[in-house]
Amino acid sequence: MLSTVCVVERDQDNGRRIKDLLHNRFLIIAYSDAPSVLEGLNTFSPDLLVLDLSVPGLDGAALVEQIHRQRELPVIALTAHASHVDRKRLLAQGFSDQVAKPFADPAFLVATIERCLARSGGTRLASTLSLDLLNLHADRASDPGRALSPAACEPRARAGRVRTASG
């Protein structure tokens, strides 16, 4: 079974780059702010979260704390602060790992995701399946030219490749 990776990135261009990097390896669900993530996690269960620490709505540590109150979920921090001290602080705050931005080696993000999934018992299976969902709005699910909600896409995701006009 294909692993689902939730990407939370405040910058739309960075979000697209990350999705482009990952979409052939994982099912991708993307958000750009903390409140949307918390709402989406009520209906959609990713295997791993890749989190920009500077997303609007909550700081990264507070968001991870709220998520971990509801469920155990591996979370990789995306941050410009990549020192050894920063890494220790993030691990103590409940993050599974960290990846520095900007990406010097995009393959490192993929390897980090695969390593965290393996540690958590998640599955990794290369596939061409993709959900390109940067701006999720459940009320737009019936309009094929707009982004879809995770709940609206999940049944179709198992049937094949799904692309939206935003991807």
Image (spheres, rainbow, N blue to C red):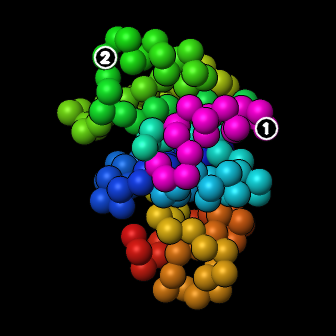
| 18 left or right of 75 in image | left
**Pointer 2 or 1: first along the chain:** 1
Residue situated furthest left in the rendering: 104
Q: Secondary structure at mark 1?
A: helix
Which residue is at a point 42% across and 79% down the rendered structure image? 165
Spatial distance from mark 2 to mark 1, Cα to Cα?
Answer: 29 Å
Which residue is at a point 49% across and 86% down the rendered structure image? 145
* For residue 13, above or below residue 107: below
Which residue is at a point 56% across and 15% down the rendered structure image? 92
Which residues lie in the magenta part? 55-71
Residue of label 2: 83
Measuring from the top left, give residue 29's x and y in whole percent: 55, 56
Measuring from the top left, give residue 122's x and y in whole percent: 64, 32
* For residue 75, above or below residue 146: above
Q: Can you tell which mark lies on residue 70? A: 1
User: Is residue 93 among what the camera can see?
Assistant: yes
Identify the amino acid type marked 1.
Gln
Residue 70 lies in the magenta-colored region: yes
Classify the position of the N terminus by image quarter: top right
Q: Can you tell which mark lies on residue 36? A: none
Viewer-closest of 157 and 135:
135
Residue 145 lies in the magenta-colored region: no
Name the magenta segment's main secondary structure: helix
Measuring from the top left, give residue 77's x and y in whole percent: 46, 32
Instruction: Say few, some or many: other residues with alpha carbon within 10 Å of mark 2 (under 14 / 14 to 19 / 20 or more).
Output: few
Q: Secondary structure at mark 2?
A: loop
Measuring from the top left, give residue 95's x and y in whole percent: 55, 25
Identify the amino acid type marked 2.
Ser
Viewer-closest of 136 and 93:
93
User: Is residue 27 among what the camera can see?
Assistant: no
Classify the position of the C terminus by image quarter: bottom left
